[in-house]
Amino acid sequence: MTDEINFLQRRMMIGAMSRRDFLGRAMAAGATFSAASALFASSANAQEPKKGGHLRLGLKGGASTDSLDPATYTSSVMFVAGRTWGDTLVETHPTTGAPVPSLAESWEPSADALVWTFKIRKDVKFHNGDAMKVEDVVATLKRHSDEASKSGALGLLSSITGIESKGGDLLITLKEANADLPLILSDYHLLIQPNGGLDDPSAPIGTGPYKLTNFQPGVRLTFERNKDDWRSDRGYADSVEIIVMNDATARVAALSSGQVHLINSIDAKTVGLMKRAPKVEVLNTPGKGFYSFLMHCDTAPFDNNDLRLALKYAIDREAMLKQVVGGYGTIGNDYPVNENYALAPEGIEQRTYDPDKAAFHFKKSGHSGPVVLRTAESAFPGAVDAAVLFQQNAKKAGIQIDVKREPDDGYWSNVWNVQPFCASYWGARPTQDLRYSTSYASNAEWNDTRFKRPDFDKLMLQARSELDETKRKEIYRQMAVMVRDEGGLILPVFNDFLNATSKSLKGFVHDIGNDLSNGYVASRVWLDA
């Protein structure tokens, strides 16, 4: 309840919520009427966000290969950059994950949920001064849903058969019913651009709170406040700078010395030390993201399921949680969904470290010799240590893992989704359908385990159109078991998001959607100094 109340109070402080709405939402979150009234009074009298200053973020996750085309965004730096200059049609609530209006002010499905009508805001301007029109929205969605687009959102939009403007509204037609369509449109790749970005997909002309002023791939991005922003509850700093800092030591030093106001991807080993620093605050946010090792199911020797099972049994998840994540997370079970997702599966036996079972499946696979595991610090915090720990675990089962450390720069373009066995990180998706359709659907651009199963695709489509939640949950359970037992994902831990800020930074919103306040950190915070 605390996070929900904090969110409501902040909305009150910026004048974005009426007293009636505040009281209703606070009581729905578990507060009594008297407690909600007291919270309203304290919110009304609380300090409002301050405008001004130059906000500096020191972020891991940038590379010289980064592009401004939102279709290509994969890492933390471009994820935050996109949220800073652009808007999607729909956002998600930070504590419930429910869809929240953005550039679409409302939506309505047909009775069979096959046709959706979205009311598009009429009072929004792009950074170049042009009015945003529904035709821009149509062009954006068509660009990302084009089979030749290479967009990270391509798999999410595969069920769409029609995108058109009708009477000033956006009309979307689907192959099959999908109650999650509004949440699909919150995907961070789907930033609305003039003419959909077809003229220049790398032109960062959006409707967001800041305008991009400089872009040096793998080095920095700078922004200035959008004075014509259509929203008043964001964009408090005069300017924003995102500095790429892939080295963990450099990030901590920059925050400690006051060079930046926020850093991401804190190594769990340093949390205790950082908490003792008088001007630093560590932020711990549970979420849906996970640290993992990926095997290509269609590439030898990982096209053998016994070898995949051997490696899944050969990893000590408890040790990984304790030694790599520092306890800031939960144990994974080799499918990409945890209890933070609606309709999460239950009753699936937890896979544990078992060298004997690992040895059995390894022998059964017929494979001999080492397997090469590629990793880099940019894969996730502690990824190199995690790979070495995995190597030690597997050795007890008679499995030799050769750990190859790759350069941080270019890891996400040269190793991830290219090499057959590597360390990886995945952030959250709003729903299970989005989680699976992004990286497990056979036609997904980011199917990074090469898990291509027509029977799985069929279940995914069945779950998407199933309106009975009990039946839908059972289908999701079948899908989870299939990925767990036959897929190429080794998922030892779901991580908490660990970031740190200077105490002069205020307004950080803990958001279960994804790291860095679901990418909106630059939009939501302000400086009190």
Image (cartoon, helix red, strand yellow):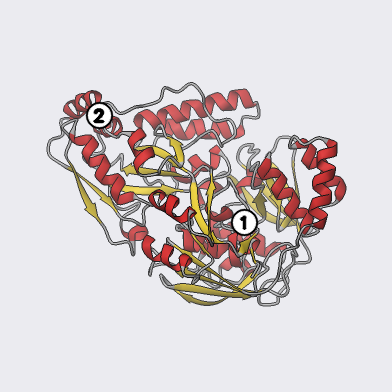
Q: Secondary structure at mark 2?
A: helix
Q: Is residue 451 visible?
A: no
Q: Position of residue 191 (x, y in %)?
A: 60, 61
Residue furthest toward the left?
369
User: Residue beneath label 2, please?
Assistant: 306
* Disc marking residue 199: none
The mark closer to the camera, 1 or 2, is 1
Crowding around mark 1 (Cα neighbors within 10 Å: few <14, some 14 to 19, many 20+) is some
Q: In this view, which residue lies farthest toward the right? A: 20
Tell me, for residue 508, which label it has, or none: 1
Q: Is residue 405 visible?
A: yes
Residue at x 57% of width, y 40% of height: 431
| Residue for point 69% across, 63% down | 234
Disc 1 residue type (three-letter): Phe
Q: Name the image quarter holding residue 300.
A: top left
Q: In this view of the protein, which residue sits in the foreground, 304 or 250? A: 250
**Disc 1 vs disc 2: Cβ atoms closer than 8 Å?**
no
Q: Quadrant of the N terminus?
A: top right
Q: Nearer the viewer, residue 482 or 454?
A: 482
Q: Is residue 412 left or right of residue 398?
A: right
